Image (cartoon, helix red, strand yellow):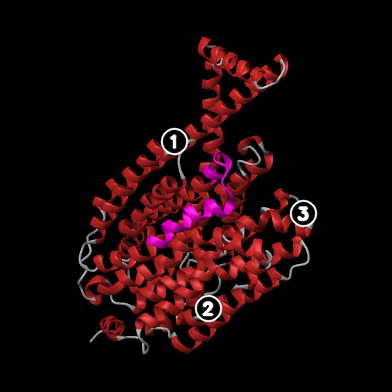
Amino acid sequence: MSTANLTTAEQASWTPKVNPWIIGIVVSLAAFMEVLDTSIANVALPHIAGNLGASTDESTWVLTSYLVSNAIVLPISGFLVGWLGRKRFFLASIALFTVSSFFCGIAPSLGVLLLFRVLQGAFGGGLQPMTQAILADTFPPEKRGLAFALYGITIVCAPAIGPTLGGWITDNYSWRWIFYINVPVGALALFLVSQLIQDPPHLSRLKATMARFDYIGFGLLTVGVGALQVALDKGQEDDWFGSRFITTLIILAVVGLVSLVIWEWRHKEPIVDVRLFKLFNFASCSLMMFVLGAVLFSSTVLLPQFLQTLMGYTAQSAGMVISMAAIILVFLLPLVGRLAGHIQARYILAFGWITLAVAMYFSCKHVDLLISFRAAAWMRIWQYMPVGFLFVPLTMAAYVGLPKEKSNAAAGLINFVRNIGQSVGTSAVTTLLARRSQYHQAVFAEYTRSFRFHVAVTGLTSRLIHSGLNMHSAQQQALARMYGMLMAQAQALSYVDIYWLLSMTSVLMFLLCFFLAKNEPRAKAEIQMH
């Protein structure tokens, strides 16, 4: 029997010594802790700025610094696993993430906080892809749907729960506790992983074949991804190409990322395995994961912003609208995982994308300045439920036809494109809201010259005079109120435009589903994995 056949037989016969579901819960605990930190600090920024003597703009670097370092580590996690071993890398990531969280909590100044947020993001960057890769190796293909459903609960629900939990902790205790809560969770995860997780045989052989660290590739990745993340986070704030700083960052990002692809494509042992994108199924699933990250995160930003800026909701009330949908998804994802064991992933994906398109179109027809709390909560539920039909089968479809030794590199890249999608989606939504609001204001400016507008102002002026104001004050207040109403309507229409755009984007992804390779849900591992 050849070495290749021995290797395949060894991979197929290997099973973990511990119950796979116990392993799934343990590794998902670590991933949940890390994903929660991407959103839990959002609502605490004003408190952090006030406590550390910083401006509001300076405090936003608490988010940016974390996202930048996190995005840099995600795509190289596959290389680091081959270099260090997966269990060792996973344990190091959990331990150092937990320690960094503690030091974030005791930070005496903004500079120190930013330093440990960078370290926290870097060490946390390995937790998501390692969780996904461990689940892919631990469960056979016919059971991966349920396994990825467990992972999906952490990835999809944590960003929705984060702002509500962060707001409650900040209001009742201190912003420092949003970092301290990671310490006991991290310690528990560290102990359980050290006792329960083991590396499969193929990872030992992968480690033996690894070359030296690719410093050039890492440098290009750091420059490209770092510049891109900062540009996306600060672009709208600094007026994009109107700012020399943002323009320079975008040029650096383009040059760095293009050079990275060229260098890694030709490198014998790439730090980022860009050659995986030669596989059509993996490339298509990566594109879908990018779009899912953009749609999911941008819609999570849209509704709370609408409710707080235009409807006067508090942060906690707006967070409740988001969290209610996440709770329903906790029960939906396991059902989808079971369904994925019987139906081809591409068909579930098609259903999820077309349902998401309908939900976003429904949102653009029903979002207005008279929406109730109940209507907003149901609208969010309809937006969020299709995600349950997307995340699990999308993660499964990405592994169809993928060599087993590439699972760590694939997990890192998939999580990387999703995180970049989140950043792009949030940045695009923020920019489009401002630009479309300006457009609708310009349209309404024409209306102010109409006879009907002047009749409305005159009528409102008359009522204000009857309430006790003099003529001049009544006219000024009437104009101010009418202007405020027009501005609010213009902003509301910009939200309608964004929801329509998200709907059309989902339709395009629906069409792409039918070009994916089919998977046999009940097939054995040796059939699914080459």
Q: Quadrant of the C terminus?
A: bottom left
Is residue 523 in view from this perspective? yes
Q: Earlier in the sequence, mark 3 or mark 2?
A: 3
Q: Amino acid at mark 3?
A: Ala
Residue 89, labelled with which disc?
2
Q: Main secondary structure of the magenta part?
A: helix
The structure residue drawn at horizontal position 47% and vertical position 79%, both measured from the top left corner, is 86
| Residue bearing mark 1 | 496
Q: How many marks?
A: 3
Q: Amino acid at mark 2?
A: Phe
Q: CA distance from mark 3 to mark 2?
A: 35 Å
Q: CA distance from mark 3 to mark 1?
A: 35 Å
The structure residue drawn at horizontal position 58% and vertical position 41%, both measured from the top left corner, is 309
Query: For the residue carrying disc 3, how many other residues have a C-alpha within 10 Å: few (<14), some (14-19), or many (20+)?
Result: some
**Could you tell me residue 183's position as x and y percent?**
61, 77
Q: Quadrant location of residue 505?
A: top left
| Residue bearing mark 3 | 54
**Could you tell me residue 155's position as x and y percent?**
45, 64
Q: Earlier in the sequence, mark 3 or mark 1?
A: 3
Residue 147 colored in magenta in the image: no
The structure residue drawn at horizontal position 52% and vertical position 42%, both measured from the top left corner, is 306
Of residue 397 and residue 355, the one placed in the foreground of this image is 355
Residue 435, labelled with which disc?
none
Query: For the residue carrying disc 2, how many other residues have a C-alpha within 10 Å: few (<14), some (14-19), or many (20+)?
Result: many
State which region is magenta.
305-328
